[in-house]
Image: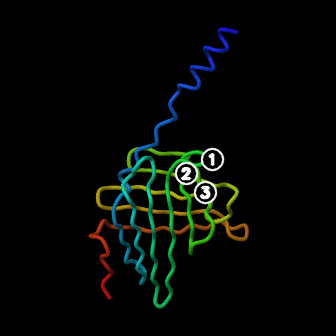
Amino acid sequence: MIIAAALAAALIQTAPPAAPDLSWLAGYWLDCSNGREQSETWSDPRAGLIVGHALSLSGTRVSFEFAQIGATPQGFAYSAQPRGAPPTVFVLGDSGPNRAVFANPENDFPARIIYERDGDALMARIDGEIDGQARSMEWNFTAAPLNTRCPH
């Protein structure tokens, strides 16, 4: 009985796992390729939470997404809300210096979200399946001052 009580006390005192360091994601990121304007803005981590939003302009079409990265019941995850929809959760599966891979194998597209930073460049990729066919999209962002626009 004493061993069980000591084990229970040790488990209660165990700190939750530390959030991975994704501070490298913070900033304003802009991609002006393929005749579109895509921007993402990410906060620095605060109390284990990173908040972001994306804005995409292509001709007269505009779309947006809200996102947050932090602790969820599923684990440390990226929660995406495209066009304000209910959140879809992608759990962090792989991370390292300047790289993070989030996955939700039950979501058809995207099933994975990947970010990689190299200096002032940030690559974002989503992949998965649409109608049984493998699909992906990729953005190549550059660090920019807040609210910088693409040249017209």
Sooner in the amino-acid sequence: mark 3 or mark 2: 2
Q: Which residue is mark 2?
A: 77
Disc 2 on helix, strand or loop? strand
Picture coordinates of residue 145, whole percent (x, y): 26, 70
Relative depth, front residue between 111 and 91:
91
In the image, taking residue 119 as reference, residue 41 lies left or right, namely right
C-alpha gap between disc 1 and disc 3:
8 Å
In the figure, residue 33 lies in which quadrant? bottom left
Given contact means CB atoms under 8 Å apart, are the residues at marks 1 and 3 in contact?
Answer: yes
User: Where in the figure is residue 143, as x and y percent of width and height?
Assistant: 30, 65
Q: Answer with mark 1 or mark 3, whichever residue precedes in sequence.
A: 1
Q: Looking at the picture, how far across and down is residue 126, in whole percent?
A: 54, 63
Residue count near mark 3 (Cα–Cα under 10 Å), binned few <14, some 14–19, many ≥20: many
Location of mark 3 (residue): 89
Question: Helix, strand, or loop for circle 3?
Answer: strand
Asked if marks 3 and 2 touch (Cβ < 8 Å), the reply is yes
Q: Which residue is mark 1?
A: 74
How crowded pointer 2 is (Cα within 10 Å; few <14, some 14-19, many 20+) is rated as many
Residue at image coords 39%, 51%: 45
Looking at the image, which residue sits at the far left? 145
In the displayed structure, would residue 103 be above or below residue 19? Answer: below
Name which residue type carries label 3.
Val
- Kind of residue at disc 1: Gln
Indicate the position of residue 51 as horizontal and vertical percent values.
44, 60
Of the residues shown, which amino acid type is indicated by label 2? Ala
Quarter of the image with the N terminus in it? top right
Residue drawn where x is 62% and y is 61% of the image:
88
The image quadrant where one finds the C terminus is: bottom left
Q: Which mark is residue 126?
A: none
State if disc 2 and disc 1 touch (CB < 8 Å).
Answer: yes
Q: Residue at x 61, y 67 (%)?
A: 135
